[in-house]
Image: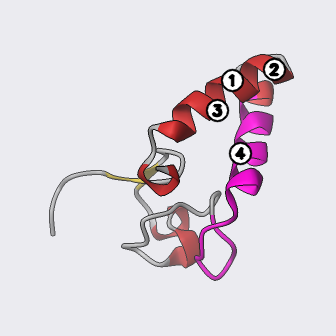
Amino acid sequence: MDDEMKKCQSCGMPMITPSDFGGRKVGNRYCAHCTYPSGDLMARHLVFDNMVKYFMRMKRLERAAAEAYVNEHMAGMPAWQ
């Protein structure tokens, strides 16, 4: 097993424990926040909306600033290229 930390290819979240992985499937390329319970990746607009809400809450960003940040961030993620 490689020691490299796995990161969600949709949002970049580190995935360490089985519950971090989509569908609790270790090896899934996407995290539990970006997937349905089955482990399948959600549509981009759903991931985008969840990330915007997260950054508004955690970073106390206004919606427009959070949307701009998330758009830029997602543009660099493999899932959305």
What x and y, as percent, mark residue 77? Answer: 45, 45
Callout 3 touching callout 1 (CB < 8 Å): yes
Is 32 located above or below residue 11 in the figure? below
Q: Residue 18 colored magenta?
A: no
Q: Amino acid at mark 4?
A: Phe
Secondary structure of the residue carrying numbered label 1:
helix
Does residue 19 appear in the picture of this structure?
Answer: yes
What x and y, as percent, mark residue 58? Answer: 72, 27
- Dot 2 crowding, Cα within 10 Å, few <14, some 14–19, many 20+: few
Q: Farthest residue toward the left?
A: 2
What x and y, as percent, mark residue 4? Answer: 21, 52
Label number found at residue 64: 2
Specify whether 18 is left or right of 1: right
Q: CA distance from mark 4 to mark 2?
A: 13 Å
Q: CA distance from mark 4 to mark 3?
A: 7 Å
Q: Which residue is mark 1?
A: 68
Q: Amino acid at mark 1?
A: Ala
Q: Residue 37 colored magenta?
A: yes
Q: CA distance from mark 2 to mark 1?
A: 6 Å
Q: Which residue is mark 4?
A: 48
Label number found at residue 70: 3
Q: Quadrant of the N terminus?
A: bottom left
What x and y, as percent, mark residue 68? Answer: 69, 23
